[in-house]
Amino acid sequence: MSTTALNDLQSYVESLVKKYEVPAVSLAIWHNNQLHRAADGILNSETGVAATPDAIFQIGSITKVFTTSLIMQLVDEGRVELDRPVKHYLRDFQVADADASNSITVRQLLNHTSGLMGDFFPDESDADSNLIARYVDRCSLLPQIHQPGHYYSYCNSAFAIAGRLVEVVSGISWFSAVEERIFKPLNMNHAVSRPSEVLRYRTAIGHELKSGQPATWQPATACYLPLGLASAGSTLTMSATDLIRIAEMFLNEERSETNDIWLSTDAINNMLQTQIQLPPFSKVYNRYAGLGWAKLSLKSCGTEIIFHNGGTLGQIATLQIIPEQNLAFAALINGNKSGLLEAITEELLAEFADVHIKESEPTTNDDSTELANDTYTGQYRSFDGTYNISLENNKLVAKLTYDFDPTLPENLRLTPIGDNIFATYRENGERLSNIVFLENERIKANLRKEFLFSNCRLSYRVI
């Protein structure tokens, strides 16, 4: 890094905007009990409004930390038990699988082990469908990827259900619960749960690249993902400074601004405690799920990173906490430029915590997986996309087609780096996240090898 964040955060943020040619970046860092913040760029390419540290951006799936915190407050109050079935609290709760409807627990919603198909983004063109309750009613159509508790599979729909549980048990809307139970006690003054309130603030709008013009941004075609997914990540909007406030609370287990206990120590520890280890996606770190949070543990030194990323229509975000370094940082960006969020994360972890998470490139010695003609090939499906995996010259290639995400279809090259583990590359050589193929225990009896396919975010079922 030619400009270091430690020495000059403003210049560092300006260099990110210039290097990656994105509309705006807002960054906040909590280091040794001091807050540092900076922002640069424009919030809207049509108006040219400048980004400032107080400007608010959508935080996407980092919302899941907030929804989990609301659930844990109800646990602290004795009103919710994590290992009770969801149906105990939501009597009308139903998904396509009757057994799953009766057995999915609150904990399984929060640690992504419910097995529900997660990327369900229904059309909300009619006025009555923008409620979390309406969304949960429509989850009656959702199939299972796997049996509850059997695997980890990232699940947006589970957090819509969790949001509805908050509403039913607390007696107020999820939006009001976030405001009254989190924003106000933590003195988060630049944070919004309801889309109607963003006009009060200097607000970033999402951007997408114009077709055929790789350096030209335009406002995204829509401002929000379906509002029924609010408790999963479609509406929360805030400054990087307010997002860091949540990290401070988990770092220091602080009381709120009103001197009330925001979450009990047991609740905080429960959220940060390992719930399930994910498949071995990386040679650098092990990855785990907590409640609401994700976790990395460096194989070289054992350092833990607590984090969550977020993405909406044309906006991306990350919140990272390194407890042993008393360090946290939040980055908010209103243009989804490939590689930028990863670069910020890698650079700040290296500079502030001497933690290095960048993957090394595969070598010939890594090629330990022998490819049978039909071992991995086939079509893998989720609600949001399809992977068609085939062999070309004894090399695996995957064509990824999105149904909901506006990203164009792309072809990926898969390079084996371990048993059932592959590094993925775009046609231009850019490396993406690793993927792993998981044997599906439910259908082993069919005597042919079938797999679930997972890429750290979603699982895809072979069809």
Image (cartoon, rainbow, N blue to C red):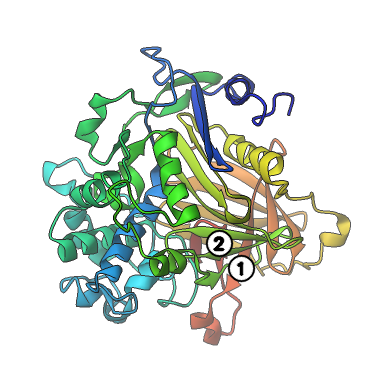
- Is residue 435 visible in the rendered image? The answer is yes
Quadrant location, the N terminus = top right
Q: Which residue is depicted at the point 42% across and 77% down?
A: 147
The residue carrying pointer 1 sits among few (fewer than 14), some (14 to 19) or many (20 or more) residues within 10 Å by Cα, namely some
The residue carrying pointer 2 sits among few (fewer than 14), some (14 to 19) or many (20 or more) residues within 10 Å by Cα, namely many
Depth order, front residue of 248/282? 248
Q: Residue furthest bottom?
A: 445
- Is residue 112 visible in the rendered image? The answer is no
- Asked if the residue at tag 2 contacts the one at tag 1, i.e. Cβ–Cβ closer than 8 Å, the answer is yes
Left-right relation of 60 to 377: left
Q: Which residue is depicted at the point 31% across and 80% down?
A: 103
Q: Earlier in the sequence, mark 1 or mark 2?
A: 1
* Position above or below: 84 against 457: below
The kind of residue tagged 1 is Pro
Comparing marks 1 and 2, which lies closer to the viewer? 1
Depth order, front residue of 190/257? 257
Q: Quadrant of residue 447?
A: bottom right
In percent of width and height, residue 58 lies at 38, 37
Q: Quadrant of residue 218?
A: top left
The residue identified by callout 2 is 454
Looking at the rendered structure, the secondary structure element under dot 1 is loop
Q: Which residue is depicted at the point 31% across and 32% down?
A: 223
Q: CA distance from mark 1 to mark 2?
A: 9 Å
Depth order, front residue of 347/268? 268
In percent of width and height, residue 112 lies at 43, 65
Q: Which residue is depicted at the point 29% across and 44% down?
A: 183
Question: How many numbered marks are there?
Answer: 2
Q: Which mark is residue 11?
A: none
The kind of residue tagged 2 is Ser
Q: Which mark is residue 279?
A: 1
Q: Residue furthest right?
A: 365
